[in-house]
Image (tube, helix red, strand yellow):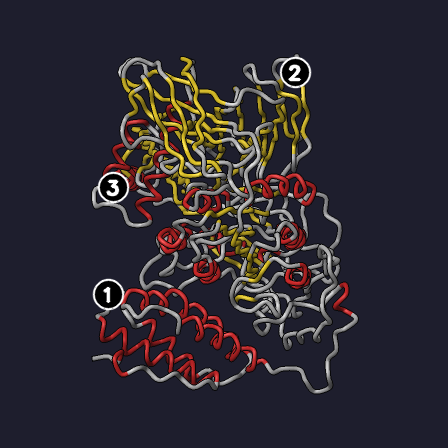
């Protein structure tokens, strides 16, 4: 069986059922043919059933792999496989055992399915031994809380596509861990499990999508239902409402419903006993009110301007950042770090924290207005730099990250940042229609802050009102939970570290209790003026079938994050035991369903990885022109189908733009918001993040300045910098950061392998493409590839000294002399 990729004509003829770039196959569409989502919302929780239909259009048995998203807070509680007249209930097992059972069944010719979690919001489904012409249906059951965005609204968000993610780090030797298109790396050892192939632009809609949501407010004063990204139809009788997605939509963006409520009680405690009566689950919601006393703040604003932020996302990110800058007072201090593969700061504000004066805020907003999307998402260094700047424990310390979150090294980031975030509140702003909510929620939780998701420019103003409350002084900090008459099971409270309380931002805490379901819970802390603060709630016994699994999912997420940052040796077994006891999927378990009937006789199934949609809005309105090449016709085997669906555009060439000329002093008064620039050429349609233009010289804006600074920009004749100068400046910035690292083996090897090596990989590749001599850098890159993470101190110190010398020689900067008392022995 073959797939033919036909040459594209100079002018595409109209085709009623095919689009430009579509693949024509002899066997029809790919295995996944339908996704049906049915959610039943009751109060502030949702029970969800997602039905995935797989059909084998070929004449040979198939094994289909589908990498798909689910809500990061949702608890997956059941799997069922249906094929022909067979119904097989899945079993939750330890992940290694589940994989073994699945592989054994496939080898024996039995139908089987396995569902695994790779990230809190990324899952892999494998369905094997689908017979020719047969259709297999997989049903997943989920329970999901509806996160509060404010005291008067909640959100039902269901993701529909896994967006491409930037994968840093050097490739690992050996085979891949999964079936995706990305190589596994030292920073993302499972990159091949979270990188599905992407459909070519113009491919006809391959999957039938249906979404139905039944809403029962359960006594809450529901006033409005809003669909953020889709056109929906509503019907209901006043008490219950059904929302349906219109037919024909593609799986290319999140499905988002917002539920608005009238104001209601400030605290509520629900007690849900288990059937045994010996234990139960409690759910506490606190809706704080009042105003906090302002305190001087240190705020670091970290803005992602990588290639995946192209288009409306970059515009929204600039606006959000400028609105935050506009809230700074004279007694506040701040820094703005924009990043891709390098970090840039507003000119004239220095490398530390600047006072929140009118002049400094104007400089920051001017810097933001000139930003365009480009390059890769090297997030570790700017976040590390932000933590370094927030060192004054006498002030409120706030880190705000604005990004789409499309990175694959989430675990590496969290493990590195967790010890550095103590005393620092982290708020995340996710901007995308297919946002990486799992990572942004995890980072905000570790930093004791909140996550705000923005899926469109229309949503930005509403979201900014919430963000302003959250970066202001909290109403109360140092929160603790106290029980009176209710016995809480130790180490079951989720979140394990309740965040600070902010005006109008609800706090939800869940956990387990023993014995009689009665008593009160109180949350206590310290108010912004230093006085004690407390709020109490008396328990009410309720029926809530989803509460137990929703708590278990939140508790497992806390344990998994604790494992990521280095927990006790027995933590993995505890996570597995908790997952199996409460029947909720986690990263160490998997649901597996095996049909006892043999379906095939000794014939290994063809393996097909289901390609996914490119998220809507990622392609840009006017794709960058690509070099014209002679058309060709290819014939490839069915096994190679997934590889035919991905494409990577070439990076544009040309020197970086010049910096703007010096400016006169900024006028007094609040800084105006400069007009948004048109930015650099849009990212090619279908390009994954990190494949934009190579970054220009650090410190220089991308694209021509706009607004006030445009008239003052001058480019003297003959002043355009060479590409080599740009590479030297990039490595000069890296060299400066490396010299600030404490002289320990662990820190040095981390910086060499996690920071320097990925940057060297990028620069060497770009220099070679421009026919520049990259020999010393390539040799250093190869040396770092050969440096084992377990190398002894002497080896690491020698490699460290050598790396600094190579960088100093390349950049033309002399290496500082090492004091004699720090010479390696």
> Which residue: 32% across, 44% down?
562
- The residue pinned by badge 2 equals 236
- Is disc 3 placed on a helix, strand or loop? helix
State the residue position of label 1: 790
Q: Is residue 395 left or right of residue 349?
A: left
Mark 2 vs mark 1, CA separation in Å: 63 Å
Q: Residue at x 52, y 23 (%)?
A: 266
The residue nearer to you, when weighing 689 against 755, is 755
Query: How many neighbours does mark 1 have within 10 angstroms: few (below 14), some (14-19), or many (20 or more)?
Result: few
The percent coordinates of residue 702 (x first, y second) are 65, 67
Mark 2 touches mark 3? (CB < 8 Å): no
Q: Residues within 10 Å of mark 3 (few under 14, many from 20)?
A: some
How far across and down, in percent of the image, does residue 208 sit?
59, 35
The total of numbered circles placed on residues is 3
Which residue is nearer to you in this view: 351 or 728?
A: 351
In the drawing, does residue 765 fall left or right of residue 81? right
Q: Mark 2 against mark 3, which lies toward the viewer? A: 3
Where residue 571 is drawn, which disc sits there? 3
The residue located at (48%, 61%) in the rendering is 382
Q: Which picture quadrant has residue 7? A: bottom right
């Amino acid at each position: 069986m073959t797939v033919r990729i036909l040459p594209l004509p100079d002018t595409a003829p109209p085709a009623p059922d095919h689009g430009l770039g579509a693949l024509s196959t002899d066997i029809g569409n790919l295995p996944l043919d339908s996704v049906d989502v049915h959610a039943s919302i009751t109060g502030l929780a949702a029970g969800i059933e997602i039905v995935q239909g797989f059909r084998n259009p070929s004449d040979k048995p198939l094994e289909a792999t589908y990498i798909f998203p689910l809500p990061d807070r949702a608890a997956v509680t059941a799997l069922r496989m249906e094929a022909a007249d067979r119904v097989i209930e899945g079993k939750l097992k330890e992940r290694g055992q589940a994989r073994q059972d699945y592989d054994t069944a496939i080898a024996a010719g039995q139908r089987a399915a396995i569902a695994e979690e790779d990230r809190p919001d990324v899952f892999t489904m494998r369905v094997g031994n689908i017979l020719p012409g047969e259709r297999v249906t997989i049903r997943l059951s989920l329970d999901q809380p509806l996160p509060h965005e404010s005291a008067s609204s909640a959100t039902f968000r269901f993701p529909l596509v896994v967006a491409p993610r930037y994968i840093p780090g050097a490739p690992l030797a050996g085979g891949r861990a999964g079936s995706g298109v990305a190589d596994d790396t030292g920073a993302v050892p499972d990159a091949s499990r979270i990188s599905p192939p992407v459909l070519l632009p113009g491919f006809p809609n391959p999957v039938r999508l249906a979404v139905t949501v039944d809403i029962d407010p359960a006594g809450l004063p529901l006033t409005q239902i809003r669909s953020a990204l889709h056109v929906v139809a509503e019907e209901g009788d006043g008490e219950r409402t059904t929302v349906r997605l219109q037919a024909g939509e593609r799986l290319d963006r999140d499905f988002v419903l917002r539920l608005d409520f009238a104001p209601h009680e400030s605290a509520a405690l629900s007690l849900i006993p288990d059937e045994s009566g010996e234990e139960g689950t409690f759910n506490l919601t606190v809706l704080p009110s009042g105003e906090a006393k302002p305190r001087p703040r240190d705020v670091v604003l970290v803005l992602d301007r990588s290639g995946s932020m192209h288009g409306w996302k970059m515009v929204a990110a600039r606006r959000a950042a400028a609105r935050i800058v506009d809230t700074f007072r004279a007694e506040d201090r701040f820094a703005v770090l924009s990043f891709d593969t390098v970090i840039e700061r507003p000119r004239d504000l220095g490398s530390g924290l600047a006072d929140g004066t009118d002049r400094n805020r104007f400089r920051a907003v001017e810097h933001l207005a000139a930003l365009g999307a480009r390059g890769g998402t090297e997030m570790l260094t700017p976040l590390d730099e932000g933590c370094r700047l927030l060192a004054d424990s006498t002030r409120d310390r706030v880190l705000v990250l604005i990004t789409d979150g499309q990175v694959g090294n989430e675990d590496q980031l969290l493990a590195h940042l967790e010890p550095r975030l103590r005393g620092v509140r982290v708020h995340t702003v996710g901007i995308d229609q297919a946002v990486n909510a799992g990572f942004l929620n995890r980072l905000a939780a570790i930093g004791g802050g909140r996550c705000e998701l923005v899926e469109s420019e229309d949503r930005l103003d509403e979201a900014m009102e919430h963000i302003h409350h959250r970066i202001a002084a909290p109403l109360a900090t140092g929160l603790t939970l106290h029980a009176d008459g209710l016995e809480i099971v130790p180490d079951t409270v989720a979140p394990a570290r309740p965040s600070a309380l902010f005006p109008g931002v609800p706090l939800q805490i869940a956990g387990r209790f023993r014995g009689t379901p009665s008593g009160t819970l109180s949350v206590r802390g310290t108010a912004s003026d230093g006085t004690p603060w407390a709020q109490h709630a008396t328990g009410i016994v309720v029926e809530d079938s989803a509460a137990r699994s929703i708590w278990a999912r939140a508790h497992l997420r806390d344990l998994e994050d604790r494992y990521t940052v280095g927990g006790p040796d027995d933590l993995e077994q505890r996570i597995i035991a908790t997952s199996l006891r409460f029947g909720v999927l986690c990263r160490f378990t998997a649901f597996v369903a095996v049909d006892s009937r043999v379906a095939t006789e000794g014939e290994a199934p063809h393996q097909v990885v289901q390609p996914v949609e490119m998220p809507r809005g990622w392609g840009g309105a006017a794709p960058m022109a690509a070099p014209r090449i002679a058309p060709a016709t290819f014939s490839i085997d069915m096994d190679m189908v997934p590889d035919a669906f991905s494409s990577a555009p070439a990076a544009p060439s040309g020197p970086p733009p010049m910096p703007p000329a010096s400016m006169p002093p900024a006028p007094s008064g609040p800084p105006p918001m400069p007009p948004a620039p048109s930015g650099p050429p849009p990212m090619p349609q279908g390009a994954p993040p990190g494949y934009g233009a190579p970054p220009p010289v650090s410190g220089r804006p991308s694209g021509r300045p706009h607004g006030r600074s445009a008239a003052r920009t001058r480019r003297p004749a003959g002043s355009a910098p060479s590409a080599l100068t740009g590479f030297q400046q990039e490595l000069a910035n890296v060299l400066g950061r490396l010299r600030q690292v404490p002289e320990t083996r662990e820190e040095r090897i981390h910086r060499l392998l996690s920071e320097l090596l990925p940057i060297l990989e990028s620069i060497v590749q770009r220099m070679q493409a421009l026919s520049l001599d990259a020999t010393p850098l390539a040799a250093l890159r190869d040396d770092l590839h050969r440096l084992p993470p377990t190398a002894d101190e002497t080896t690491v110190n020698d490699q460290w000294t050598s790396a600094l010398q190579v960088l100093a020689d390349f950049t033309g900067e002399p290496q500082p002399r090492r004091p004699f008392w720090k010479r390696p022995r």
